[in-house]
Structure formats: C-alpha cells, structure tokens
Amino acid sequence: MTRAGTLVVGRGKVGRALVAALTAAGHSARLVPGKTCSAEDVGTARVIVLALPDAALEAAAERLAPGLSRGAVVLHCAGRLGVEPLAACARAGAHVGVLHPLVSFASTRVAPPLAGATFVLAGDARASSAGRALARALGARPLVAHVHGAAYHAAAAMLAGGTVALAAHATDVLVTLGVERRAARRALAGLLASVAANLTRLDAPEALTGPVARGDAPAVAAHRAALDARSPEALVVYDAIAPAVLAVAVRAGLDATRAAGVRRALSAASPRAKRRRAPSR
C-alpha cells in the first residue's frame, strides 16, 4: 500500500492534515484538489482517501472510478455518511469504506495532532484493513464500528463544537475580570486538557467535577448571581448546560436531596430578572 502511495483528494483542513502527517511518518502521499480530481489522478495509488464535503463525495467518486484498478481501496472521511456515496467506485471493482478521524480540524494553518486519536472505520474487510493500516501509520487508534450516520456525527459534533462554544463564553467571563484574552484562552485550554486526560482514564460520571456535580446549591446560586452581573449571555449558557451536568451527577450517585437543592438554585429567577419584575413605586 505505502510503496504505491496514498492519494488524498481534497485540499481542505482534513486532506492537508492527513497528507502532512503521512509524509512526516515517512509514507508516500499525494494531495489533489477535490473539485478537479479525475481518473488520471489515481495513477498507481492503491488507497484513495476522499477528504471532501459530504455533498461532493458522490461526484468525486464517479470521476475517479474509471481510473481505479480492481482491488483498489477507496475511503471517505465523512462521519455522517456510510459507503453509499462511493457506489461508483464499488462498481469499478474497488473496496470501499469510511475512515473518519474523530479529531477536530479547525484550520488549514494549524493541523491537530493525529497520534493518539481514534479513527472510526467501516466498510468491507479489505477497506477496513487499509483503514487500520493508515490509522496506525499516523499513530492513531483504529476502531472498526459500522456506526457512521447522523447520530454518531451528532455525538461528535456536540462534544467538539459544544466544548469550543463553552470555552468562548468562559473566556469572555475571565476577560471581564481583567484577564488578557490570550492568557485566558491558554489557561482554559489547560483546564480542558486535564478534563480530556481524566476521560482517558475514567468513565464520564466519575470524571465529573464542580459544584453541580457535588450538589453544592449555594455555590451554584453564587455562580448564577456573578454571571448575571458580569455576563448575562454566559448565564444563559450556564443555565442550559447545568441540568445536563446534574443528570450525569445523578447517574454517578449524587444524593437526591442535594440534587433537588441544585435544581431549586437553577430554577430561581436571576437578580436581574427580579429587578425587572419589581413593581415601581
């Protein structure tokens, strides 16, 4: 596989990161644009990875199919889709599958580390084998699981996008307290790294921390009052996420009385809302 090289189609965030990582690991990899890829681009590549937007996969597969040799492997990186967009390649005699890096690709300028990440694979036996080889070449963990689809993708998006959104609001709060934005971002990134480290060793309920998880209703009330004064937008986010945190805490064994106290603290009107409701004299 590696002697003939790997063809990566798509010069976006995922494609660039894959080729850079493969090259750094000493493997031969070529990168071609998705919009103009054609059968001639296949060359001697025995493994082709389509790192393209969902809507572009089927058309790209149809353009590449005439250049495929029987037994070639074609994988795509879309977590929301199964192998169906690669039907043209399958008809040409290729083995098809999904190679979805469970990684947050945020920028073409800064590639995320792939070593230690999980690549979720699906497809026939040959496609899955090729996907495992690619993942291991990058120092990633291959996981063969036919789970790709909207629910799987939603779980990944909820964590990746939700975490960044929460970090943005938390950063804004620290800035209101006088912390320089870059320093705040780095500090919170360090906190997130410790959360990720806990999750590698502990199940989610056991890794949960903070006043909501402990059932500390007075601390929760103080949080809400402080956010109401400094960042009402952050209070909305806090109130939205806290019930989800509480639900996990209850799963982890939080005492029912403490959980009820937190619910009362969360349902109490904010000081700002109380002032708005106060009758004028």
Image: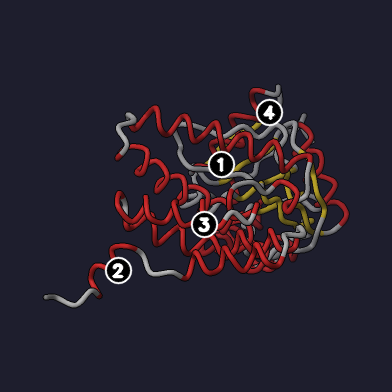
Residue at image location 84% in from the left, 59% down from the top: 124
**Label pair 3/1, CB-CB below 8 angstroms:** no
Kind of element beneath mark 2: helix
| Position of residue 66 measured from the top left corner of the image (x, y, whole percent) | 65, 57
Disc 3 crowd, CA 10 A, few/some/many (<14, 14-19, 20+): few
* N-terminal label among 2 and 1: 1
Q: CA distance from mark 4 to mark 3?
A: 24 Å
Q: Along the horizontal axis of the image, is 261 left or right of 97?
A: left
Callout 2 amino acid: Ala
In the image shown, does 20 or 213 lie closer to the viewer? 213
Residue 192 occupies which quadrant of the picture? top right
Q: Nearer the viewer, mark 2 or mark 1?
A: 2
Identify the mark nearer the N-term, 1 or 4: 1
Position in image of residue 167 (x %, y %): 46, 45
Kind of residue at disc 4: Ser
Q: Which residue is mark 3?
A: 53
Q: Nearer the viewer, mark 4 or mark 2?
A: 2
Which quarter of the picture shows residue 26?
Answer: top right
User: Real-space Cα distance between discs 2 and 1?
Assistant: 49 Å
Give above or below for 242 relative to 210. below
Residue at left offset 34%, top offset 33%: 181
Circle nearer the N terminus (4, 3): 4
Q: Residues within 10 Å of mark 1 (few under 14, many from 20)?
A: many
Q: Which residue is mark 2?
A: 273
Q: Which residue is mark 1?
A: 15
